[in-house]
Amino acid sequence: MEDVKTFTYLGSIIDEHGGSDADVKARIGKARAAYLQLKNICNSKQLSTNTKKFPPIIGRFVPFIAVSAANCINIPCMRSAELTEGTPILDENGEKLGKSTVVGRRAVSQVVLSRILMASPGMTILPFVMQSLEKQKLLIRYPWLGAPIQISLVGLMLSLVTPLCCAVFPQISSIPFHKLEPDVQAHIKEIRSDRLPSVVYYNKGL
């Protein structure tokens, strides 16, 4: 029942953004695949059993592992068309030259890495900070302050780190022409034999 409600909600969101029936079904299918894979990871009894054997500080890193896994699954699923059909590539003047799956893999990988980096400070540094603060008199006396302090610190870190991590890779990135797949190179040589670009450009997405 919970799964039905989840997919009904996903369908309503996707439908609001428009698109053909085929597009909507494809998006729901990708969302369903990502959701089920993440659910299997989160519900893994073996994972829960193993984490209990580690020191408490290790348990604090479980959310970071979950977020990293979510990004590694969700982004490739939702952008699977770029992995199979390719990402549009442009010349220095913004003229479209075609699509490249090599570029698609690179763009998706860059976004996955930047998303993981966004979560890293708040989920890798903060556990040590909170472990230290919990030993101080203030939190010993008022343990309920732990949650608001942690939320505030996470919000502060995200507000600082998010724009920095988005800029790790340029929004409009480039790749040398010779690194494209042979058929794409051949297509560009056919349409631009007189002025082959040394590099091509693409929008990596967010």
Image (spheres, rainbow, N blue to C red):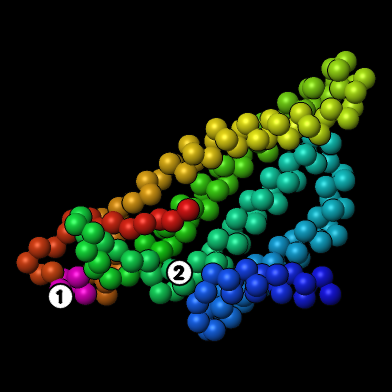
Q: Quadrant of residue 154?
A: top right
Q: Is residue 128 left or right of residue 166?
A: right
Magenta segment boundaries in residue numbering: 186-191
**Compared with residue 119, is residue 112 higher up or lower down, i.e. above or below?**
below
Residue at the (63%, 31%) spot, across then down: 156
Looking at the rendered structure, the secondary structure element under dot 2 is: helix
Quadrant location of the N terminus in the rendered image: bottom right
Q: Nearer the viewer, residue 50 or 124?
A: 124
Q: Could you give the CA–CA distance between mark 1 and mark 2, rounded to whole angstroms?
A: 24 Å
**Compared with residue 160, is residue 39 higher up or lower down, i.e. above or below?**
below
Residue position for label 2: 83
Report crowding for label 2: few under 14, some 14 to 19, many 20 or more residues within 10 A (C-alpha). some
Q: Is residue 97 magenta?
A: no
Residue at the (87%, 53%) spot, across then down: 49
Asked if residue 178 shows in the view, the reply is no
Q: Which mark, by number, is residue 203?
A: none
In the rendered structure, which amino acid carries the disc numbered 1?
Glu
Q: Which mark, by number, is residue 190?
A: 1
Residue at the (60%, 55%) spot, across then down: 71
In the rendered structure, which amino acid carries the disc numbered 2?
Leu
